[in-house]
Amino acid sequence: TGSVFSAHGSDASSAAGRVSYLFGLKGPCLSVNTACSSSLVALDTGFATLVLHKCTSAVVASVNLQLHEASWVGLGALNALAPDGQCKTFDGRADGFGRSEACGAVLLKQGSAD
């Protein structure tokens, strides 16, 4: 059992708000989950916000952690994982994909009109 904060603290969609609060960031904060394209969609959202002049800068960050074995088991059962762990995109030898963990962040700022 957990405390009254357990459900909120373990909710992945709340992570963006917790990180923003920790760093004292101001303004809108959202979490994007579109599976494999989450980083790209988050970057596009930050860029669009700048273009629409809704802000003057935006922090876009992304994290992928593989914490639960159930996803590995499920993908293995589907034969979705490459036996050698290597992605062979657009290659006739393609036989699945390789999973990885990563994190990154970029600061987007409005440029000059020149």
Image (cartoon, helix red, strand yellow):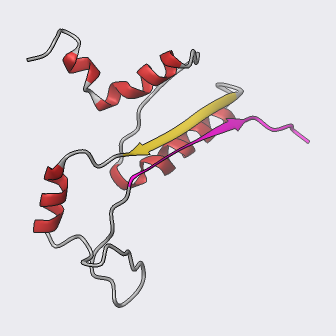
Rendering coords of residue 4 (x, y %): 18, 9
Q: Is residue 97 above or below residue 17?
A: below
Quarter in which the C terminus is drawn: top right
**Residue 48 vs residue 13: left or right?**
right
Count of marks, rendered view: 0
Image quarter of residue 93: bottom left
Q: Residue at 41% of width from left, 32% of height from top?
A: 31
Magenta stretch: residue 15 in it? no
81 left or right of 98? left
Examine the rendered structure and indicate whether residue 14 appears above or below residue 50.
above
Residue positioned most to the top: 4
Please give the name of the residue rendered at 67% of the width and 25% of the height, measured from the top-left corner: 55
Q: Quadrant of the N terminus?
A: top left
| Horizontal relation, residue 114 to residue 53: left or right | right
Q: Is residue 100 above or below residue 25?
A: below
The percent position of residue 106, horizontal first and vertical second, equals 62, 41
The residue furthest right is 114
Is 11 displayed left or right of 102 in the figure? Answer: left
Residue at figure coordinates x 16%, y 73% from the top left: 79
- Residue 63 place in picture, x, y as percent: 43, 43
Q: Position of residue 29 (x, y in %)?
A: 49, 24
Q: Is residue 5 above or below residue 16?
A: above
Q: Which residue is rendered at x = 47% and y = 24% of the image?
A: 19
Res 47 → quadrant: top right
The residues colored magenta run 101-114
Is residue 111 within the magenta segment? yes
- For the residue pair 53 and 111, the one nearer the viewer reads as 111
